[in-house]
Image (spheres, helix red, strand yellow):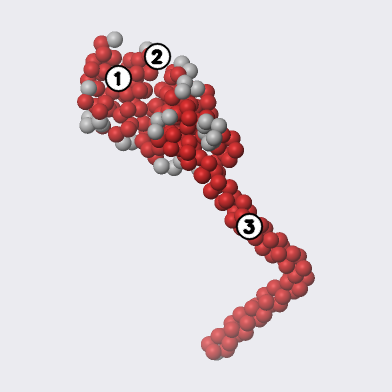
Amino acid sequence: MAKDKVNEKEALRQENLEETVSKTDQFYNEHKKTIWTVVCALVVCALCVFAYVKLVYQPKCNEAAQQAFPAEQSFAAGEYELALNGDGNVLGLADVIADYGAKAGSAVFMEAGVCALQLGQFEDALAYLKKYNGKEPILAARAIACQGDAYVGLEKYDEAVSAYVKAAGKADNMFAAQYLLKAGLVYEQLGEKAKAVECYKVIKDKYPQSIEGYDIDKYITRAEAE
């Protein structure tokens, strides 16, 4: 009896399997033209993307990197005007960005932003720095802090202090002390002494070994006295 039930279940399973296969075959036969059209289209798209990347995008990125190299050397040497605008013989970072965009790498936006900041071109600095999207936390924090410097240059102190606080939170290392000190100074400029003291005390508690931490007490004393 038990054996009969097993055989029954096996027969039913086999019947269901055959029915599924039959339906699959029927669907394929009815739609095989459409299926193969879609498959061919996907293959063609994949080949087009691969060809674009290999034959167009990557060579353009290599070209952009080569064009940016002299400007990046000038940037490393602190020659900000030359780095940003070039000299007529080699492209500056501004030209590289205009011609190639992000193909030269995200770093060109940071470098161009720092150059513009050093040259007092604060609006341009912000435009470049906001396009920087590097993932390395220290550099990402620096880009935000540089935005704060640009806002200070434009006397937009509320935006500046927000940028410094954000940069400090993103860095969470010894550089954070530098950004917190800047935030505290801007808070003092805004007349918000209590918030300034908060920033200074974070430096004292969390980053006492930083350069800013060595003489942070004088900032605390001054802000509390005022």
Residue matched to label 3: 51
Do the residues under discs 2 and 1 have CB atoms within 8 angstroms?
Answer: no
Q: Position of residue 92 (x, y in %)?
A: 52, 33
Q: As drawn, is 5 to the left or to the right of 19? A: left
- Camera-nearest residue between 195 and 4: 195
| Residue occupying the point 58% across, 40% down | 100
Residue matched to label 2: 190
Disc 3 to disc 1, C-alpha distance = 58 Å
Q: As drawn, is 82 to the left or to the right of 44? A: left
**Residue 148 vertical position relative to residue 9 in the rendered view, above or below:** above
Do the residues under discs 2 and 3 have CB atoms within 8 angstroms?
Answer: no
Q: Quadrant of residue 95?
A: top right
Q: Residues within 10 Å of mark 2 (few under 14, many from 20)?
A: few
Disc 2 to disc 1, C-alpha distance = 13 Å
In terms of sequence position, does the residue under pointer 2 or pointer 3 come before the other?
3
Q: Position of residue 75 (x, y in %)?
A: 43, 33
